[in-house]
C-alpha cells in the first residue's frame, strides 16, 4: 500500500463499522461520493474488492476483513503516537446507534447513557426503544450498532452477550383479592383476565415458554387485552382491567408506593437474561466497543 493511501484507512474503517457508505458519509461529514472515491482508491491500490454492496449495505469481503484488522492496529498506533508526542490522547468521538427493548430501554438504558456520556462526552448517541423483534431486526439491518434485548432470535448473524438479569411477576392492583397472597398458581393465572404485551415482546415469549415447560399451553391464558407498552399495561392494571405479567423492574416504583403488588407464580421459571446484541458480520466501531466496556465494568443489578 502506498503511503499516500494511509489517510483513507480511517474512511474505510468507518464504512466497515457503519455498514454503509451513506452512514459513513454522515458520520464523517463528507459526501457519499467522497467516501466512495477514498475506498475505490484503496481497492485500486490493493487490486481487490473490499466491500460487497447488497441492498444499500456494505459488507466486508475476506480481503476487507483482513485489511480492517490491520487498519485498526495502524490507527491505534497513530493515536498512541499523538498521545506520546502531544502529551494527550484524542478523546473518542463518532456516533453510537442503539436499539433497546422495553425493559432495558426504559429502566436500564437511561443510567447507562448517563455514565457513558460522563466518560465519553464527544460521542453522539442515538437510541430507539421497540419490542425485541424490532430491536434484533434493526441490528441485523445495520440500523443499530448494538441492541439491548430481553430475548434471542433465530438469525445466525447475531451474537449475544448477557449483561443483566430480569424477573417477571404477576402484577395486580393493591385492591385485588390476590394482593395479600405470597404467590399464585399456574391454574389461578390461567383463570384470571390478563393484559399481555404484544407478540414479538420478549417478556411475553418468556411467559409462554415457562407455561409450556410447566405442561401448560399459552392458549389456556384468558387474554383480555394486548398492549405494546409496559406503561399502558400498568395503567390498565390500576384501572382494574385485569392482571398482567411484567418485569419487576418495570413496576418497582408502583410496588414501593403500595399501588401494585408483584407476585411470583409457583412452578414457573420467569427469570430471563438481558442481552447486548451485535451483528458479527459488521466490525464494531470504537463507540460500540466503548459501550461494551461500560457494560462489562458496571454490570446492572438483577431485577428481583
Image (spheres, rainbow, N blue to C red):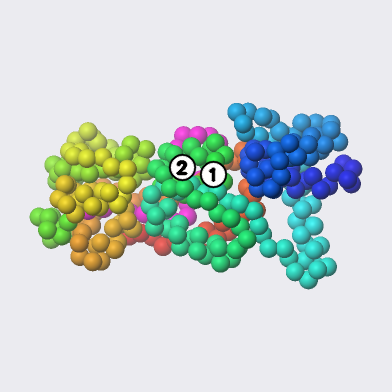
User: What range of the chain is rendered magenta?
Assistant: 153-171
Tell me which residue sits at (66%, 57%) in the image: 93
Side (left or right) of 195 relative to 78: left
Q: Does the stretch in magenta take in 36?
A: no
Check disc 2 and report its element: helix, strand or loop.
Answer: helix
The residue wearing badge 1 is 144
Instruction: State if disc 2 and disc 1 touch (CB < 8 Å).
Output: yes
Distance between the Cα atoms at labels 1 and 2?
8 Å
**First of labels 1, 2 by sequence position:** 2
133 or 181, nearer to the observer: 133
171 or 181, nearer to the observer: 171
Query: Which percent across, then down, holds residue 229?
Result: 32, 47
The residue wearing badge 2 is 135
Query: Which percent across, then down, holds residue 75?
Result: 77, 53
Of all residues shown, which one is farthest toward the top? 54
Vertical placement of 65 versus 236: above or below?
A: above
Q: Does the stretch in magenta take in 166?
A: yes
Amino acid at each position: 500500500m502506498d503511503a499516500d493511501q494511509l489517510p483513507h484507512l480511517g474512511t474505510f474503517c468507518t464504512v466497515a463499522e457503519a455498514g454503509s457508505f451513506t452512514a459513513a458519509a454522515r458520520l464523517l461529514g463528507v459526501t457519499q461520493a467522497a467516501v466512495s472515491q477514498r475506498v475505490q482508491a484503496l481497492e485500486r491500490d490493493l487490486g481487490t474488492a473490499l466491500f460487497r454492496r447488497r441492498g444499500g449495505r456494505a459488507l466486508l469481503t475476506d480481503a476487507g476483513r483482513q485489511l480492517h484488522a490491520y487498519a485498526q492496529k495502524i490507527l491505534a498506533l497513530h493515536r498512541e503516537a499523538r498521545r506520546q508526542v502531544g502529551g494527550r490522547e484524542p478523546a473518542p468521538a463518532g456516533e453510537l446507534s442503539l436499539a433497546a427493548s422495553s425493559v432495558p430501554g426504559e429502566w436500564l438504558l437511561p443510567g447507562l447513557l448517563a455514565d457513558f456520556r460522563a466518560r465519553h462526552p464527544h460521542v453522539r448517541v442515538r437510541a430507539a426503544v421497540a419490542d425485541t423483534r424490532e430491536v434484533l431486526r434493526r441490528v441485523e439491518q445495520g440500523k443499530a450498532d448494538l441492541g439491548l434485548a430481553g430475548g434471542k432470535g433465530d438469525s445466525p448473524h447475531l451474537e449475544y452477550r448477557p449483561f443483566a438479569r430480569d424477573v417477571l411477576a404477576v402484577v395486580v392492583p393493591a385492591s385485588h383479592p390476590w394482593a395479600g397472597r405470597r404467590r399464585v398458581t399456574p391454574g389461578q393465572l390461567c383463570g384470571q383476565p390478563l393484559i399481555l404485551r404484544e407478540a414479538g415482546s420478549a417478556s411475553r415469549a418468556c411467559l409462554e415458554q415457562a407455561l409450556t415447560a410447566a405442561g401448560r399451553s399459552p392458549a389456556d391464558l384468558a387474554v383480555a387485552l394486548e398492549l405494546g407498552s409496559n406503561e399502558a399495561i400498568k395503567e390498565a392494571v390500576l384501572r382494574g382491567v385485569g392482571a398482567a405479567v411484567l418485569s419487576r423492574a418495570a413496576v418497582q416504583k408502583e410496588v414501593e408506593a403500595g399501588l401494585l403488588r408483584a407476585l411470583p407464580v409457583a412452578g414457573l421459571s420467569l427469570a430471563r437474561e438481558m442481552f447486548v446484541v451485535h451483528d458479527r458480520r459488521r466490525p464494531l466501531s470504537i463507540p460500540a466497543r466503548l459501550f461494551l466496556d461500560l457494560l462489562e465494568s458496571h454490570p446492572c443489578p438483577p431485577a428481583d
